[in-house]
C-alpha cells in the first residue's frame, strides 16, 4: 500500500470520514457497501483486493441500477478483484 496503511487503518479512516458531518459523499450508500465488502473479506493473497476496487465495483452496480438496465459486470485484470460481485476476467 502506498501510504503503508493496513486494512484496519483504512477501515477506521473511511469510517471516520463517513461519520464526519462536514464531509459529503457522492454516493454514501456505495461507500458503505464497498467498506462492508472490503472489511468482511479475509486477508489472503487470492482475495486481498483494495477498498478502491470494492468501491468501483459497487458504484458501477448502483449506476446501472439507476439506469434501469441489466448489469453485466465489470472487467478487470486484477485477480484479487475478481472475487468482487460482478467482476469478470477479460
Image: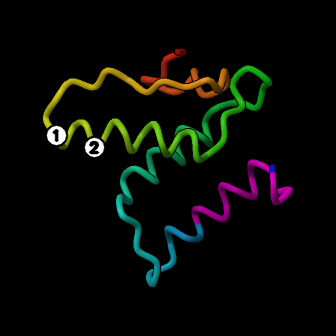
Relative to residue 32, is residue 11 drawn left or right? Answer: right
Relative to residue 86, is residue 72 drawn left or right? Answer: left
Q: Which residue is mark 1?
A: 67
Task: Tell me the residue at 60%/28% (across/down).
Answer: 81
SS for dot 2: helix
Expressed as whole percent of the image width and height from the top left, the position of residue 12 reads 67, 61
Q: Which residue is mark 2?
A: 63
Q: Is residue 54 depicted above or below 29 in this figure?
A: above
Task: Tell me the residue at 36%/64% (across/down).
Answer: 26
Task: Tell me the residue at 66%/65% (across/down).
Answer: 13
Secondary structure, magenta segment, majority class:
helix
Q: Is residue 61 depicted above or below 23 in this figure?
A: above
Quadrant of residue 67 within the rendered picture: top left
Expressed as whole percent of the image width and height from the top left, the position of residue 25 reads 41, 67
Task: Tell me the residue at 51%/78% (across/down).
Answer: 20
**Label disc, if present, on residue 31 of the rendered structure:** none
Q: Residue furthest bottom?
A: 22
Does the residue at mark 1 contact the one at mark 2 (Cβ under 8 Å)?
Answer: yes
Expressed as whole percent of the image width and height from the top left, the position of residue 4 reads 86, 56
Q: Is residue 82 depicted above or below 56 in this figure?
A: above
Q: Nearer the viewer, residue 33 or 55?
A: 55
The residue carrying pointer 2 sits among few (fewer than 14), some (14 to 19) or many (20 or more) residues within 10 Å by Cα, namely: some
SS for dot 1: loop
Quadrant of residue 50 within the rendered picture: top right
Quadrant of residue 61 within the rendered picture: top left
C-alpha span from label 1 to label 2: 6 Å
Q: Residue furthest left?
A: 68
Relative to residue 40, is residue 5 drawn left or right? Answer: right
Q: Which residues are magenta?
A: 2-15
- Let me know if residue 28 is in the magenta part: no
Expressed as whole percent of the image width and height from the top left, the position of residue 82 reads 57, 21
Q: Residue furthest right?
A: 4
Amino acid at each position: 500500500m502506498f501510504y503503508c496503511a493496513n486494512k484496519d487503518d483504512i477501515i477506521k479512516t473511511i469510517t471516520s470520514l463517513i461519520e464526519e458531518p462536514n464531509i459529503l459523499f457522492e454516493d454514501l450508500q456505495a461507500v458503505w457497501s464497498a467498506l462492508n465488502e472490503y472489511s468482511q473479506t479475509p486477508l489472503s493473497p487470492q482475495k486481498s483486493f483494495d477498498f478502491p476496487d470494492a468501491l468501483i465495483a459497487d458504484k458501477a452496480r448502483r449506476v446501472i441500477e439507476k439506469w434501469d438496465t441489466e448489469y453485466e459486470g465489470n472487467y478487470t485484470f486484477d485477480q484479487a478483484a475478481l472475487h468482487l460481485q460482478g467482476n469478470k476476467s477479460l
